[in-house]
């Protein structure tokens, strides 16, 4: 890369469940996009690159609505929930190479009020990761949804390393604690204890209801440009020190992996840390894509915050809640703030590095990571710096 | 050619024509006129107007309906195209329990519901019982009669029917269209590799792709071997055995069509071949699942096109879980002796040496069987070997030949005794692979025998200038026909499990995955009976054979062979991997 790229604008809509956003998914994303562009001090017409989330709108639609007359760069990274962070990498490459000046990365949906993911699966079996493989070899047995796919991996982790429900519960509790300090969080005002967690209903054993992310309506967006251009803008830029993405092997089939716990981020993390010249020990916070509790634990291990198998102890000893040594998802994450497809993790990281996180501000936050997770374990990670 | 009055025919149909007249009618050549009169009478008696082409039964007729030929009940109920077995669209009342069969058969007449069921086919239009059949369970409805109507009209009546019909049983075409009528869960789309994978399942075979170049198994199917890049592969049959690798319990369905199934447990099974498959464990509550539990494949025909491989807890595994090893006898690690309820399981575990026996192991076997014989809680023993290559290939030649040729009798000092001579409890041999030489000699001393499909049986001693002196000369010719026994003894050529079954050397041949469960089934059957009766029964049968003089003769004559030059040359040649040069002395 010729120099570095920065995140210069962030924007979000309101996050909600009942009664729903009342807007189309495109309208939601446009609102978040407009706020992010405004936050960057740009005109919407200055956006010349757009990276939509897979299956949630085309760049052409965004450009036509926002009035982007000079669109030069459009791409979508097909990694499900790992797409927003993976897009940071491509946006950084585009803006530093001159392929685009200002790249908009939007994401958002009516995850609560819209057609739910499981309905989509029932209607179109090819819509799920693995496509025909899942349709022909998983779905006939009712193995149809992400919590089920990951639950069999979580069970293996418990079997091989002695990870316990209490460890997963500690993650759920910590995310709720963070959410109490975030006015936007859907779960603000709804604290839980470990007992509440242990008593909550099983959804797909070993996952309880409280192990699973929320279903919410809402959108978020960021704007990326080169460090050089960022200097001329009004706000405090946040530097993308590095970003990387990776896929498990094989990525289209979740069961026949020689190493069951090696996922996309296992490959991506060393690259990201290496490129940024930092180690997990150096970071002040981690925004970890938390579709389910165990995936937080697994990513912490695979990112190198602790050795594989030691995630449970790490979470208990080090602390990932407010005031912990490694605050994870200070906004509450998908588990307690809202499910914005991982985009709100980036937004929150930027807030922390700008020092704008109000009562949940991590003191002196200078360096943080944000990860993404999608499909059958695709992964992405970015190291962000003040 | 006699002409018959319509009245005569009518009486014939009604069964009131006097016997002499019937006989007369039967003697004469049939005439077309008679057929027409016959049909005319029947036509007047049915509740429909379409012309009868041929009567099938007193109540069923093939009739011309517009351009079709259909089967109709006399009430007018239409069973569809006459080339489709009408039974598949009749109402069927099945009697398959003692109670329901007992309603029609009494006492000794009663067929055994274990293997027979009685089906009554009833007209949905009028409730008439049209047909009854007694068939083995699961047998498809018998298609009694598919008449070649065109030939009949062409050649017999000499008035061809207007439209010709392809003469072919179309029942399966019809039945295959019933698919998915009741099954609404997602099913695989049968295309490409997936079509092939599930076609094998349909045949009751679980097969995975296996690379021809590097031998790697893979699932799900792929074009290339990701290990070596080869495009060459074949569908290779899996043992069907695996272990539970992981699972999740869906307490709430995340797909509407599984809503009625909760809680259900999508389970990952790791096959012996190393590949993992997502499946379901049938007849197993989710809370019974445990990582590592052995399971075996079963097939679930969910639609007429799709059969899903599912798994069940392996029966021998369930049994093994309840099995307690006996440690007090201090047996070598190559002989296991376990007890499970009334059954002793004695296992030869030396698969690296094809389960060949050392003198030490032979002694251990005897001690284990002596303990079995003395333990009143044990009624039946199962004798088997570890692995799927060999059951037992006899004595370890490296060790045994010097001993035997030096006159060591390997433990049987009493010349009237051989292995199991004094065990009158039942011994079931579960023969998991090659059963050669001393292996077969041992099996000849057992009672019931179950063999895996890959097992072989042979007495190869003569090929090395030796004789099988463990009682085979006496026992084998008493158990199977003379010529087969003598062929085994003199040629040294082994026979297959199937052949062994045909000649009566074994009771059952089963896939190796079912070997132990079959053996346990037999053991359980025996344990249901009076133990004293069973034991005495065996003792009488064995002692009545009067084998002792034969054993003495065998031992005496065998000594001559064992001390010969040939007996030294044979094993030497065997060790040197060359043809022996026999002198006959
Ligand atoms: Zn009828
Ligand atoms: Zn290969």
Image: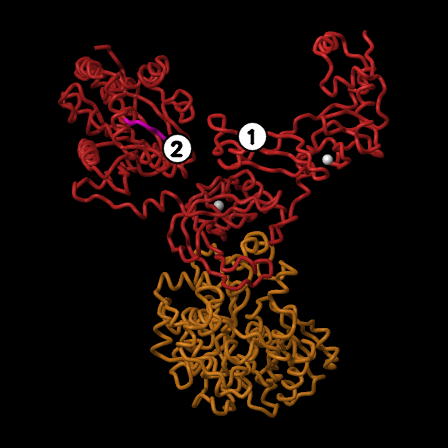
Chain colours: A orange, B red
Residue A32 drawn at (x, y percent): 64, 83
User: Which quadrant of the structure image shows residue B94?
Assistant: top right
Q: Relative to the observer, which residue lies in front, A304 or B504? A: B504
Whichever of callouts 1 and 2 sits on the residue coming sooner in the sequence is: 1
The answer to if B277 sits in the magenta stretch is no
Verify CB contact (< 8 Å) between mark 1 and mark 2. no
Say which quadrant the N terminus of chain A sits in.
Answer: bottom right
Which portion, as a residue range, is magenta? Answer: B446-454
Asked if residue B432 is positioned above or below residue A98 in the image, the reply reads: above
Name the chain letter of the residue that bears numbered label 2.
B
**Residue tagged 2:** B452
Q: Relative to the observer, which residue lies in front, B161 or A83? A: B161
Asked if residue B133 is positioned above or below residue B282 in the image, the reply reads: above
Asked if residue B30 is positioned above or below residue B332 in the image, the reply reads: above
Mark 1 and mark 2: Cα distance apart in space: 29 Å
Estimate how packed mark 1 is, as few (under 14), some (14 to 19) or many (20 or more) residues with alpha carbons within 10 Å: some
User: Which quadrant of the structure image shows residue A54?
Assistant: bottom right
Q: Secondary structure at mark 1?
A: strand
Residue at image point 75% right, 28% down: B61
Residue B278 drawn at (x, y percent): 50, 53
Q: Which quarter of the rendered image does ligand 1 occupy?
A: top right
Q: Give the foreground label among 1 and 2.
A: 1
**Residue tagged 1:** B135
Q: Secondary structure at mark 2?
A: strand
Estimate how packed mark 2 is, as few (under 14), some (14 to 19) or many (20 or more) residues with alpha carbons within 10 Å: many
Residue A313 drawn at (x, y percent): 34, 73
Would residue B332 be found to the left or right of residue B170 on screen? left
Query: Which numbered disc covers residue B494?
Result: none
Q: Relative to the observer, which residue lies in front, B491 or B311? A: B311
Would residue B518 be found to the left or right of residue A6 on screen? left
Residue at image point 79% right, 30% down: B46
Name the chain letter of the residue that bears numbered label 1.
B
């Amino acid at each position: 890369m010729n120099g570095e790229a920065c995140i210069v604008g962030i924007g979000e809509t309101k996050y909600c469940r009942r009664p729903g956003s009342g807007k189309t998914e495109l309208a939601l994303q446009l609102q978040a996009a407009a706020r992010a562009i405004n936050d960057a001090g740009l005109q919407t017409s200055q956006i010349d690159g757009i990276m939509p989330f897979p299956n949630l709108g085309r760049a052409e639609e965004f450009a036509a609505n926002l009035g982007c007359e000079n669109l030069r760069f459009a791409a979508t990274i097909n990694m499900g929930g790992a797409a927003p962070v993976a897009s940071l990498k491509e946006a950084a490459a585009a803006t530093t190479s001159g392929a685009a000046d200002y790249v908009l990365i939007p994401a958002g949906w009516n995850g609560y009020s819209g057609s739910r993911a499981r309905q989509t699966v029932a209607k179109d079996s090819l819509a799920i990761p693995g496509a025909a493989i899942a349709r022909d070899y998983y779905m006939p047995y009712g193995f149809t949804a992400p919590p089920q796919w990951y639950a069999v991996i979580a069970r293996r982790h418990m079997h091989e390393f002695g990870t316990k429900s209490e460890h997963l519960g500690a993650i759920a509790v910590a995310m709720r604690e963070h959410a109490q300090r975030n006015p936007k969080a859907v779960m603000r005002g709804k604290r839980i204890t470990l007992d509440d967690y242990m008593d909550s209903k099983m959804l797909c054993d070993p996952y309880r209801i409280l192990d699973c992310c929320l279903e919410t309506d809402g959108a978020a967006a960021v704007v990326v440009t080169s460090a050089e251009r960022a200097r001329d803008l009004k706000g405090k830029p946040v530097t993308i020190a590095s970003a990387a993405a990776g896929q498990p092997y094989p990525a289209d089939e979740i069961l026949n992996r020689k190493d069951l716990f090696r996922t996309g981020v296992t490959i991506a993390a060393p690259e990201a840390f290496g490129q940024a010249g930092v180690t997990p020990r150096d970071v002040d916070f981690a925004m970890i894509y938390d579709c389910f509790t165990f995936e937080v634990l697994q990513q912490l291990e695979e990112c190198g915050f602790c050795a594989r198998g030691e995630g449970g102890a790490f979470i208990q000893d080090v602390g990932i809640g407010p005031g912990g040594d490694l605050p994870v998802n200070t906004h509450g994450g998908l588990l307690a703030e809202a499910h914005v497809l991982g985009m709100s993790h980036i937004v929150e990281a930027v807030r922390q590095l700008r020092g704008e996180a109000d009562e949940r501000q991590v003191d002196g936050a200078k360096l943080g990571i944000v990860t993404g997770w999608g499909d059958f374990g695709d992964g992405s990670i970015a190291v962000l710096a003040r | 050619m006699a002409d018959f009055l319509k009245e005569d025919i009518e009486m014939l149909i009604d069964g009131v024509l006097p016997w002499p007249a019937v006989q007369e009618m039967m003697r004469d050549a049939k005439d077309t006129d008679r057929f027409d009169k016959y049909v005319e009478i029947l036509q007047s008696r049915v509740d429909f107007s379409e012309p009868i082409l041929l009567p099938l039964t007193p109540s069923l007729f093939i009739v011309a309906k517009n351009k079709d030929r259909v089967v109709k009940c006399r009430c007018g109920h239409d069973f569809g195209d006459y080339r489709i077995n009408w039974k598949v669209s009749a109402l069927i009342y099945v009697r398959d329990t003692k109670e329901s069969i007992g309603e029609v058969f009494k006492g000794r007449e009663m067929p055994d519901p274990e293997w027979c069921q009685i089906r009554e086919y009833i007209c949905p239009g009028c409730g008439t019982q049209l047909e009854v059949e007694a068939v083995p369970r699961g047998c498809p409805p018998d298609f009694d009669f598919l008449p070649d109507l065109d030939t009949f009209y062409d050649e017999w009546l000499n008035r061809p029917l207007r439209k010709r019909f392809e003469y072919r049983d179309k029942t399966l075409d019809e039945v295959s269209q019933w698919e998915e009528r009741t099954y609404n869960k997602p099913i695989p789309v049968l295309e490409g590799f997936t079509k092939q994978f599930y076609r094998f399942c349909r045949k009751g075979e679980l097969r995975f792709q296996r690379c021809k170049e590097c031998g790697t198994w893979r699932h799900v199917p792929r074009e290339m071997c990701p290990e070596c890049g080869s495009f060459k592969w074949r569908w290779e049959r899996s043992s069907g055995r695996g272990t539970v690798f992981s699972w999740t319990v869906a307490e709430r369905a995340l797909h509407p069509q599984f809503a009625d199934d909760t809680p259900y447990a999508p389970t990952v099974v790791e096959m012996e071949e190393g590949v993992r498959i997502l499946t379901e464990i049938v007849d197993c509550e989710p809370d019974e699942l445990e990582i590592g539990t052995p399971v075996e494949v079963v097939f679930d025909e969910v639609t007429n096109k799709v059969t899903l491989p599912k798994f069940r807890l392996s029966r021998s595994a369930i049994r093994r879980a309840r099995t307690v090893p006996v440690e007090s006898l201090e047996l070598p690690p190559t002989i296991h002796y376990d007890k499970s309820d009334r059954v002793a399981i004695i296992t030869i575990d030396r698969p690296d040496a094809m389960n060949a026996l050392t003198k030490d192991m032979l002694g251990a076997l005897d001690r284990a069987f002596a303990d079995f014989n003395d333990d009143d809680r044990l009624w039946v023993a199962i004798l088997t070997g570890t692995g799927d290559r060999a059951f037992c290939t006899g004595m370890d030649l490296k060790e045994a030949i010097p001993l035997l040729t030096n006159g060591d009798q390997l433990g049987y000092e009493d010349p009237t005794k051989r292995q199991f001579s004094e065990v009158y409890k039942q011994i079931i041999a579960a023969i998991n692979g090659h059963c050669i030489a001393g292996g077969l000699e041992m099996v000849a001393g057992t009672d019931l025998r179950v063999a895996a499909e890959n097992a072989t049986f042979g007495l190869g001693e003569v090929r090395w200038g030796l004789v099988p002196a463990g009682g085979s000369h006496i026992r084998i010719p008493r158990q199977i026909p003379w010529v087969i026994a003598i062929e085994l003894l003199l040629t040294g050529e082994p026979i297959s499990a199937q052949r062994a079954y045909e000649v009566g050397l074994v009771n059952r041949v089963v896939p190796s995955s079912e070997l132990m469960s079959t053996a346990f089934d037999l053991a359980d059957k025996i344990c249901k009976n009076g133990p004293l009766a069973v034991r005495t029964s065996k003792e009488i049968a064995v002692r009545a054979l009067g084998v002792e003089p034969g054993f003495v003769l065998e031992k005496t004559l065998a000594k001559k062979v064992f001390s010969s030059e040939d007996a030294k040359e044979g094993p030497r040649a065997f060790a040197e991997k060359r043809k022996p040069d026999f002198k006959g002395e």
